[in-house]
Amino acid sequence: MLCFTRMRTSELQNRFNNGEIIEFSKPTIVLASASPRRARLLENTRLEFEIIVSTVDDTALNNKFPHEGIDSGWAMEYAKKMALAKLKPFVGKIKNGAVITADTIIWCDGRILEKPLTIDKCREQHEFLSGKININYTAYAIYYNGKVLSSVMPTTVKVENIPLEIIEVICLEPEILDCAGYRNQGQINAYLNFNREEADNLTGLYIPKVIEMLKKVRFIQ
């Protein structure tokens, strides 16, 4: 178990944003994500961590890449590129800490679905996904002690036909506008068919994968 006194996240964030090199007195996990879902998942483990959100504007960055007319191979590579891009500002800026970034996208019928951000976009995406098979790609990247490691986990999901009135309810659910493609909770869960052993990968932070990667970079034994 990693034990240390958690500093105020805002203090760490401000120091990092101002260009300061952050050095921890004890080995520390840094979750480089503003996602409350990912933070909750880490909180449910015995791993203690700090949050320092990456300074990369992922919305602006993903607009530089094509999102339609692409194959699944490019979609997987794109997710990996995004996770590594979020990690880049931390290289050489964190000492005695392992930084974890993640990026989730949905690929369906040649199209990448990002965070909808608006209710209208959320409605359109769910109508598009209804009745189709999609692949959920979650990419992970870790930086520790000069080493960078990345990995992508795919999960194939069949979305049953979703009634329009259910889509309207889904679009008002908490955190839905900040989820790529769909949120694997709430009303939509009844319309998703996938290997239930892979359910954790749909949450955006698959803890066994994170631990496996932390071991590979020798942050934990």
Image (spheres, rainbow, N blue to C red):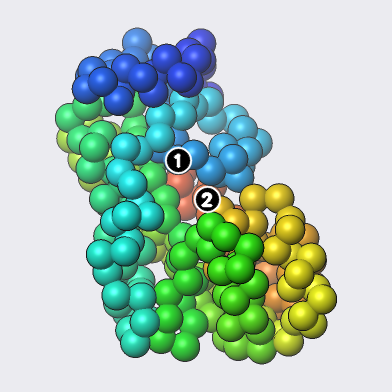
Mark yes or no: residue 92 visible.
yes
Tag 2 secondary structure: loop
Q: Residues within 10 Å of mark 2 (few under 14, many from 20)?
A: many
The residue positioned 42% from the left and 50% from the top of the image is: 102
In the rendered image, which residue does mark 1 sit on?
33
For residue 16, which quarter of the picture? top left
Q: CA distance from mark 1 to mark 2?
A: 11 Å
Residue 217 visible (yes or no):
no
Q: Position of residue 72 (x, y in %)?
A: 37, 81
Q: Are circles 1 and 2 on residues that touch, CB within 8 Å?
A: yes
With respect to residue 129, does 54 lie above or below? Answer: above
Q: Which mark is residue 1?
A: none
Looking at numbered disc 2 in the image, what kind of residue is underneath it? Leu
Q: Which residue is mark 2?
A: 205
- Provide the secondary structure element on which disc 1 rests: loop
Q: Looking at the image, is 115 positioned above or below residue 136? A: above
- Residue 177 is situated, as x and y percent measured from the top left of the image, at 59, 56
Query: Could you tell me which residue is drawn at 66 percent across and 89 percent down?
Result: 131
**Residue 107: where, in percent of width, then height?**
46, 77
Q: Quick check: 213 left or right of 48?
A: left
Q: Is residue 123 left or right of residue 35?
A: right
Q: Nearer the viewer, residue 94 or 20?
A: 20
- Quarter of the picture containing the C terminus is top left
**Kind of residue indicated by mark 1:** Ser
* Image side of residue 127 versus residue 33, left or right: right
Q: Nearest the camera: 217 or 36?
A: 36
